Amino acid sequence: MADNTVKVTKEIETTKSSHYALNDQPPMGRRFLLGLQHMLAMFVGVITPPILIANAAGLGAAGTSFMVSMTLIMSGIVTFVQCKRFGPIGAGLLGVTGTSFTFVPMAMAAANAGGIPLVLGMAMVTAPVEILLSRFLKQIRSLFPPLVTGTVVTLIGLTLIKTGMQDFAGGAGAENFGSLSNLLLGSFVLVIIIIASRFGSGLIKLGAIAIGLISGYIISIPLGLIDFAPVFNEGWLTIPRPLYFGLDFDFAHLLPWMIAYVVTSIESIGDLTAIAETSGEPVNGQLHQDRLSRGLLAEGLGSMISSLFNVMPNTTFSQNIGVIQITKVGSRVVGYVVAVLLLLLGLFPKFGAVISVMPAPVLGGATLALFGMIASAGVNIVTKNGFSDRTAFIFSISLSIGLGVTYFPEIAQSLPAFLEVLFSSGVAVGAVLAVFLNLIVPEE
């Protein structure tokens, strides 16, 4: 998920061959349907981060709509580059990209401190971290085993649950916060997601969160919970405007953002490997190593350019791996269709406006499920090689300290500015601690 939308590195069973392999050309009609399935699987993960950050920064419907539109446009562009490959840029695999949930905790802290300009500025100046890491894959992978990355993914999910619950109850500052109507609406979305996820199969199960979100949105219309005035007032074409919100920088926020890029790079290595495996491509040797390097380079450059176009960092989405498994289609031309669909949705601001007026409880019901899934997926990453006493010790200590800092960020207020920001971010603290403990705690 992207976070995704956070993305989650999973152990994938080997698929010896796809019905359509990497360079095959499915018929146009089937190609479109496959692309639509991939787009629906990633949809919620793409639109949720910009909505959360826009809300944290206090943007109105118009600003939120613009951020959603630009996010879709840049996701389409980076997806095309990742699938098509241009020289040393792009993995050349069916890797669908979108806004990463890994950056949401850091972005919300930046949005609260300096608004959207600070979010985008920090995203841009730290993007070279991933670009640099794309050149040193072997060296960094040993520092970030599944124990470390899984701990960080778990922390991301758990620290975001507070935001999901806030929206579930009506959103920050809502006059009817916690009202029965809000709780019932959020619960309705959650129940639909549970039913689709538990009793659905195949693509229904993969699209459970999108199904719940759409169902909640539809039922809100006759209840009079949606004001469509911003939709009617919105234009018909989004004109990309670089630096629309501007850029800002604060040295104090530097380290948490750098950590986020390292974490998302490691996750992307796992996701791209899983994509290659499910597509019937080799996952060892120089060819695969080159694909990983090109894939990370595409993400890093894409994130840097995206920040100039008012969009948070991009990453390869893991939920689309499931679509490849189900359809047995690893053809990268399907990724071109996904890219075009995302681009078209972003170019029509009416669509972004429709998203921006979504009732907070609808979003809250969907994100509560999503963030819980992210946290549980992190646990799966940690335990996929067993759960020894050493693993339990490192995981529990990192998780406890990370969550403790999340609950009481004011404990860092007496520290120097750059340390205050680091130690007020539960994800950053947990990540640093997990790396440190993994290095010093002896193997059993």
Image (cartoon, rainbow, N blue to C red):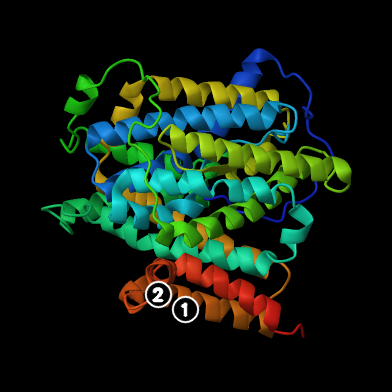
Q: Residue 334 or 156: which is nearer the viewer?
A: 156
Picture coordinates of residue 196 (x, y %)? 47, 46
Q: Quadrant of residue 298?
A: top right
Name the residue type under label 1: Ile
Determine the CA span between mark 2 and mark 1. Answer: 6 Å
Picture coordinates of residue 200 (x, y %)? 53, 45
- Report crowding for label 1: few under 14, some 14 to 19, many 20 or more residues within 10 A (C-alpha): some
Q: Which mark is residue 401?
A: 1
User: Does the image show residue 362?
Assistant: no
The secondary element bearing badge 1 is classed as helix
Q: Residue furthest right?
A: 285
- Give the position of the C terminus as an image quadrant: bottom right
Name the residue type under label 2: Val
Picture coordinates of residue 146 (x, y %)? 68, 65
Q: Is 166 rendered above or below residue 41?
A: below
Relative placement, left or right, of 197 versus 92 is left
Relative placement, left or right, of 111 versus 102 is left
* Disc 2 target residue: 405
| Tag 2–tag 1 contact (CB < 8 Å) | yes
- Residue at 37% in and 19% down: 239
Picture coordinates of residue 283 (x, y %)? 82, 47
- Residue at 72% in and 36% down: 91
User: Does the image show residue 443?
Assistant: yes
